[in-house]
Amino acid sequence: MENKEFVLLVRELIAEKNWKLLKTEINLLEPYQAAGLIEELEEGDEKDGILVFRLLNRGLAKDTFSYLPYELQEYVIGQLAENGNKLAALLNDLDPDDRTAFFEELPGKVSQRLIQMLSPSERKVALSLLGYPEDSIGRHMTPDYVAVKPHYTIAQALDHIRRFAKDSETINVIYVVDPQWKLLDDLRIRELILASPETLVSELIDNRVVSLNANDDQEVAVEVFKETDRIALPVVDSDGTMLGIVTVDDIIDIADEETTEDFQRFGSLSGDAVVNPLKARVGLLYKQRIIWLIGLVFMNVFSGAVLASYEGVIQAMVSLVFFLPLLIDSGGNAGSQSATLMIRSIALGDVQMKDWIKLMGKELAVSLLLGITMAIGVSLIAAFRAPDVIAVVAITMVLIVIAGSLIGLILPFIFIKLKLDPATACAPLITSISDITGVFIYFSVATWYFSSVA
């Protein structure tokens, strides 16, 4: 059945109050399908999504909740608050990492109230995870994993896995720990299955385990997963004691968040509402953008001041004005290109702070070639439009492209030096600086050239 047809069927069953059939139908869905259905139902005036969520069986409700966007998760919790038992069951059933991700977005008092609804064991886990620094790997780990001891035989290890793996996040990887829970190694499940039952687990250990520290920044985990191509990685404390695991699905979410944040900063935007402008309030979108734009308006006053100071040159050679937007935009575009490449390289770890001098030399050579090529193009245009300014626009194009490229390259490094996120070296700021610089270069070259010719 098509998605639209299924949504219509669900609406009909709700209208008819046929709860028995509705419950049967929706509990056949996959978690992501149920989440999509709830989102679609909540977009209407009837607000039927919460009815559907209440009818999901306990296991499906838990998995569906993790697929819902945060705003809808918050709404569901608010609606379930009327039924304390149902809400407590949901919170206790959630995977610890998903629950932590939800709690850390809530106001402190709300989080504390919900934490009190957890069972003693789950409350201990929740408080432990929330105790790690924000954006640390510890916030994203789950304590649901399977570990075996090195003295186990393969037969004993497999029996242990059968007994305790039911609630594990993954059993593709089994961890080996000593009696003090120090991490010794990780083993693929296939290694255990293929080994002889009498073999000791210690005989399979190669001591090449890769682990994460709970206090490391979450971006570290993203890079390690890229390098190791693992589906899960163990998380340890400073003494090497195993605390939990981080799975690749959590890392994908982290990577998406980091990319979104960098994109928002690069465009001078911030806040969660920009992620979905269809649902964001007009006032909030306005508030997010107006500060930067107002600031750049005042910054661009300098461009006007530079133009006013060269009023005599403009009056003497009006044809210069025709090429002004073309030249200025070229500098801004070159700067944005350069900054984008640098920010991406910094984010991927390909470029370090110490590399800026080497990069400056290379960028100077590249921008010179780019400028010369673009100067040839603009000279052809000038040959038909205003032959008397060919030399001015050609020289200016080369200088503006070089200046814009170097500005775009150096700004991210300045932000790093100031201990700020380099992604905040945003496109509008680069464009504004390039504009002011470009106007100054253009009319300085024009003044120099025409005074020399005269």
Image (cartoon, rainbow, N blue to C red):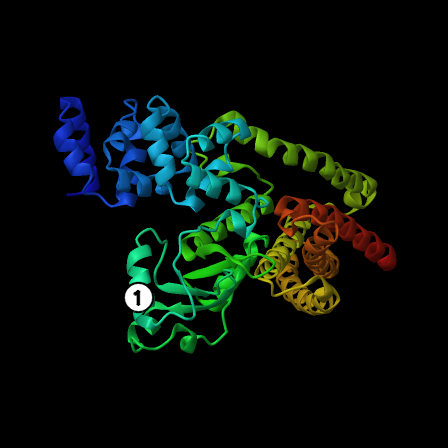
Q: Could you say which quadrant of the image residue 212 lies in?
A: bottom right
Quadrant showing the C terminus: bottom right
Q: Residue at x 56, y 49 (%)?
A: 136
Q: Residue 124 at x, y = what percent?
A: 48, 41
Instruction: Judge left or right: residue 347 versus residue 26.
Output: right
Camera-side residue of 370 and 23: 23
Q: Residue at x 52, y 51 (%)?
A: 259
> How many marks can you see?
1
- Label 1 element class: helix
Q: In the displayed structure, would residue 408 be above or below residue 195?
A: above
Q: Residue 392 at x, y = what percent?
A: 75, 57
Q: Mark 1 points at which residue?
A: 158
Instruction: Judge left or right: residue 32 versus residue 426.
Output: left
Camera-side residue of 312 and 103: 103
Q: Which amino acid does label 1 sit on?
A: Leu
Q: Residue at x 24, y 35 (%)?
A: 56
Instruction: Judge left or right: residue 376 versus residue 282.
Output: right
Q: Residue 113 at x, y = what percent?
A: 47, 27
Residue 226 visible here: yes
Q: In the displayed structure, would residue 233 be above or below residue 14?
A: below
Q: Could you say which quadrant of the image residue 156 lies in?
A: bottom left
Camera-side residue of 450 and 3: 3
Camera-side residue of 38 and 199: 199
Q: Residue at x 61, y 31 (%)?
A: 290
Residue 68 visible here: no
Quadrant showing the N terminus: top left
Circle 1 packing at 10 Å, graded few (<14), some (14-19), many (20+), is some
Q: Residue 377 at x, y = what percent?
A: 61, 62
Q: Could you say which quadrant of the image residue 40 lies in?
A: top left
